Amino acid sequence: MKNSPLAFQIWSIFVIITIGISTLFMLLVPWALRDFFTQHTYATIREAQSIYINNGKMLKDIHDIAEWDQIQQQYQTVKHILFLQDGQVLAGSTSLLIFNNYNFILEEARVQQAAAQQYVRTIDGEKMYYIIRQGELAGFPVYLFSYTWEAYQNDLVENLFSQLLWLIAIILLVSWIPSFLMARYITKPIIKMENHVRDIANRNWYESIDVDRDDEIGKLGQSIERMRKQLVEQEDMQRSFLQHISHELKTPVMVIRSYAQAIADGIFPKGGLEGSIEVIDKEAARMEKRVKDLLYLTKLDFFMTKRVAEETIRIADLIENIVELLRWQRQELNWQLDLEEIEFKGSLEQWKVVMENLLDNQIRYADTIIVIRVSQRLINKQPYMFIRIFNDGPPLEEDLIDRLFEEYQQGFKGQFGLGLAIVREIVGHHSGRIWVNNEEEGVAFYLEIPII
């Protein structure tokens, strides 16, 4: 069954459930209503007896016994026997079965305390329901014995059972048709999404998925749509990545090859062998830096999907160490550090890359000063580490501020457009955010990181 269409599976389950419930219902109904039918039987007997009762007396006069058979025809399922205290039968006829049990019936009537009492007795495997009523006839105490057999109750059960059986059969047949249509309606969007997923697997992912519903199926469709958009975005990024790679590596490769060929021909473009080799080495270093950034960005994408071992990071020590390493590049710059001692959990390797890339950017653009301030703030009762890195260099182009942390976005002194993109990825992975603002005397980068 699991290999059948989903609509058929849903419909089959509905059919099985309805048949099971109906079968259980038909089995339990006679048992559950047995007491009801028993009480109904006694009520019928009492109603039949009421014809013969007048103010607690049986009929009006003893002469009315002649009309007994004519009155009894009104309730053919209930039989009556009228007898005296000594057992003499005044009216009614006793069958052989009743005759054989007559002494028991007479004994029950004699010891009966209530004016009327109901009994049940099994005779030759069949139940007999009866009521013995005490009364008077022409001043003499008499007993009215009224009875009916279980067959009457069985007739009621069979009649009701057959009617219920037909009713349930009609309901089942009528309900199976709309249930099948409902199953097809439920599975229709799933089939639609299956076709879209098949197209996505074949890299045909430019057609959007529109599932206009908010239930679980709609949420599944929304998830597939998000996946499709991410795949499209990833493909566009891949294409852009390859274009930028070819563009970024083309120039240094061309320079290296041209200089190498010139040296092989005995020509030194930079006036001498040493100067020409220096150009080749510089371009090779540029290529190495670009390749390292690209490899690290790829490595970072991998680590973002994995759980990286976290360690305690002392941000003040980290910044001071990196400043000491980078200070020599421009010794004339004035570094001002105001670092609060803050510890947080994260990847030390990744945060080294963050600070190195940010401070390398400051060194390239700063005129005379770089200011780094680290403090702690409460945002919605949650402690955050707040970092401000300022340089007094020229302001950023306005159209670049919002795109500065995207791949391959470069300022006028930018190198490859990957350093700040790597910073954004790492900060985002640590649930933080980074932004940049032009200020009156320079440019400031801001980081906001939750302290866990």
Image: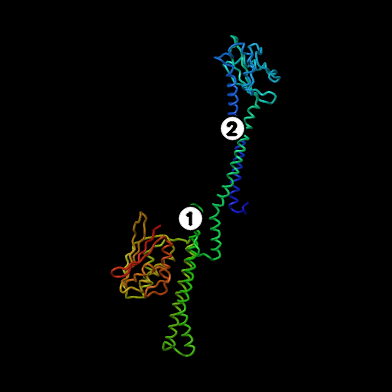
Residue 305's x, y, as percent? 49, 62
**Of residues 165 and 292, the one drawn nearer to the viewer in this rendering:** 165
Residue that mark 2 sits on? 32
Precedes in sequence: disc 1 or disc 2: 2
Whole-percent x, y for residue 79 in the image: 64, 20
Q: Quadrant of residue 450?
A: bottom left
- Image quarter hosting the C terminus: bottom left
Toward the viewer: 170 or 375? 170
Mark 1 to mark 2: distance in Å?
47 Å
Task: Answer with left or right where residue 332 lies relative to residue 59.
Answer: left
Q: Classify residue 160 by image quadrant.
A: top right
Q: What residue type is disc 2 on?
A: Ala
Q: Residues within 10 Å of mark 2 (few under 14, many from 20)?
A: few
Could you tell me residue 441's position as x and y percent?
Answer: 28, 70
Whether residue 244 is situated above or below residue 14 in the rendered picture: below
Please tell me whether mark 1 sits on a helix, a strand or a loop: loop
Identity of the amino acid at label 1?
A: Asp
Residue to which mark 1 is pinned: 212
Residue reaching furthest to the left: 440
Q: Nearer the viewer, residue 410 or 267?
A: 410
